[in-house]
């Protein structure tokens, strides 16, 4: 398995076409907008080689019997699903950010179980193709970007009726040696520093939409692939070299999302895992969504651990840690965090085997997990702001604190307790700002699907008729 340094060096060998702030990014490893996200993803490689990390970040491949990075593993038991959640919390606690590989992991697992059932029904060869692809990925230890969300265009129209079909990824040509695809994928976490892109349909489809029922893998630097990096809250601070003001200078904010634009990209048949089997698009989407929504109690649980710790530090540095209302609010933050985490553990523990032998989470509990995240992260952030104070919104620049004319005055007036410097206090406050404002909150709301998507699934999976029957029996209605 690769080390962190080997992963970073492997990106330099790629010729991925990336733009940011209106200019071509020549080196994602060095560019100030992308470098923190590269370092964060590198942690998924580096921690594999530590004793504590190896226990969570590695697994034995059922395809080869070799030890592989867990982000390239097909879940073989409910225990695997639980270990995945523990791994995500472990990584989030050490980065305070998004390490970007969950979408690829969830993608390969959703496609693996779905291709098995497509082959059984259609006598196709998708499953064995995917197995061969996974062996190659495991052997090379590559990072896969899972790409599901299309641009979608007019939301009132299905893909086949869009004025511009390119707002959904679709097949434009079928050849003897492969297919040609066009379209785009939005909000793609870690895309610019991935080796591979796994493309999947974004919604259940009808026969008229069969050209949009495509799942395939392309190298991130394949001809015809262009990525444009998205803006983030306070991102210009990275360009100014303001490490303290960046809040989390080592690992950045959220996951470094980009739009992926595909213009006549050729995909050989051995990398095609669905091509026209629209009847199975809904299965693939629901399995992916459940697996991805499972994650949030783990990764957001770990992020919330950091937010809670930073908030407790801010209270100490403000001189109010002993106040009863502060302790009560910190207790509530921990309660909400553990509620998120136990929901992820629950949907994993209730995981079931699919026909392929791979395991998938309980879909109802997974959707409840993500729906809780869309609410509780906001409350955790609100409590953090309450304790830390309005100063997180009005702090001067770190350059002001270092200015020869005014710096000494600022240090004097921002120092609170005798036990810590003004700079220590500022560092903690900037970390809180970074983790609880803007982009971070929007990702908690819409990552893995917006709240209404979970409510639809909860209603569908909640077995309301059985609940009505319980009531009928108890009150005597026949």
Image (cartoon, grey):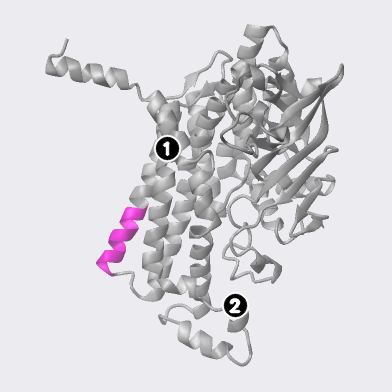
Percent position (x, y) of residue 18? 78, 50
Report how far apart the C-alphas of labels 2 and 1 lie in the structure.
38 Å
Q: Is residue 326 magenta?
A: yes
Question: Dot 1, how many residues are within 10 Å of its Cα: few (below 14), some (14-19), or many (20+)?
Answer: many
Instruction: Tell me how many marks there are.
Output: 2
- The stretch in magenta equals 323-333
Q: Position of 40 compared to 464: left or right?
A: right
Between 468 and 113, the one lying in front of the other is 468
Residue located 70% across and 21% down the image: 64
Q: Dot 1 corresponds to which residue?
A: 369
Local secondary structure at mark 1: helix
Percent position (x, y) of residue 451? 45, 40
Question: Which badge, 2 or 1, comes first in the chain's sequence?
Answer: 1
Q: Is residue 426 above or below residue 80?
A: below
Question: Dot 2, how many residues are within 10 Å of its Cα: few (below 14), some (14-19), or many (20+)?
Answer: some
Q: Is residue 310 above or below residue 50?
A: below
Residue located 69% across and 31% down the image: 199
Q: Which mark is residue 33?
A: none
Percent position (x, y) of residue 367? 44, 33
Q: Quadrant of residue 238?
A: bottom right
Percent position (x, y) of residue 76? 55, 22
Local secondary structure at mark 2: helix
Q: Position of 250 compared to 360: left or right?
A: right
Q: Quadrant of residue 454?
A: top left
Can residue 139 be seen?
no
Quadrant position of the N terminus in the picture = top right
Q: Dot 2 corresponds to which residue?
A: 398
Q: Is residue 248 above or below residue 196?
A: below
Q: Is residue 39 magenta?
A: no
Predominant SS of the magenta segment: helix
């Amino acid at each position: 398995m690769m080390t962190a340094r080997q992963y970073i060096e492997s990106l330099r060998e790629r010729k991925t076409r990336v733009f940011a702030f209106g200019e071509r990014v020549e080196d994602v490893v060095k560019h100030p907008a992308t470098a923190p996200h590269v370092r964060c993803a590198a942690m998924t490689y580096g921690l594999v080689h530590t004793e504590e990390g190896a226990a969570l970040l590695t697994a034995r491949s059922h395809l080869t019997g070799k030890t592989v990075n867990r982000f390239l593993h097909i879940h073989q038991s409910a225990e695997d699903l639980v270990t995945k959640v523990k791994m995500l919390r472990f990584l989030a606690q050490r980065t305070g950010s998004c390490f970007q590989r969950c979408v690829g992991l969830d993608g390969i697992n959703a496609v693996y179980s779905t291709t098995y059932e497509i082959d059984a029904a259609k006598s196709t060869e998708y499953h064995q193709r995917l197995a061969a692809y996974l062996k190659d990925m495991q052997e090379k230890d590559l990072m896969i970007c899972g790409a599901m969300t299309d641009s979608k265009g007019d939301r009132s129209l299905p893909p086949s009726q869009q004025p511009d079909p390119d707002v959904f990824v679709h097949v434009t040509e079928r050849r003897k040696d492969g297919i040609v695809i066009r379209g785009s994928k939005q909000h793609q976490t870690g895309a610019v520093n991935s080796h591979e892109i796994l493309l999947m349909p974004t919604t259940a489809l009808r026969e008229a939409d069969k050209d949009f029922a495509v799942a395939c893998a392309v190298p991130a630097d394949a001809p015809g692939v262009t990525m444009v990096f998205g803006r983030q809250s306070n991102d210009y601070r990275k360009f100014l070299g303001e490490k303290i003001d960046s809040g989390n200078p080592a690992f950045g904010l959220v996951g470094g999302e980009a739009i992926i634009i595909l213009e006549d990209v050729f995909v050989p048949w051995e990398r095609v895992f669905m091509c026209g089997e629209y009847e199975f698009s809904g299965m693939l989407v629901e399995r992916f969504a459940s697996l991805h929504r499972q994650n949030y109690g783990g990764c957001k649980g770990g992020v919330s651990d950091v937010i809670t710790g930073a908030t407790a530090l801010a209270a100490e540095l403000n001189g109010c840690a002993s106040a009863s209302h502060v302790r009560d609010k910190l207790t509530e933050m921990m309660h909400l965090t553990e509620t998120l985490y136990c929901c992820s553990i629950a949907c994993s523990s209730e995981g079931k085997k699919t026909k392929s032998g791979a395991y998938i989470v309980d879909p109802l509990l997974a959707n409840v997990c993500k729906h809780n995240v869309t609410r509780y992260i906001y409350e955790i952030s609100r409590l953090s702001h309450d304790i830390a104070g309005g100063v997180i919104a009005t702090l001067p620049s770190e350059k002001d604190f270092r200015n020869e004319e005014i710096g000494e005055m600022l240090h004097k007036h921002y120092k609170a307790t005798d036990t810590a410097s003004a700079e220590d206090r500022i560092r903690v406050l900037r970390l809180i700002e970074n983790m609880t404002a803007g982009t971070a909150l929007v990702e908690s709301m819409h990552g893995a699907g917006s709240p209404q998507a979970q409510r639809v699934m909860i209603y569908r999976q909640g077995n309301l008729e059985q609940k009505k029957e319980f009531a009928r029996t108890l009150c005597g209605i026949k």
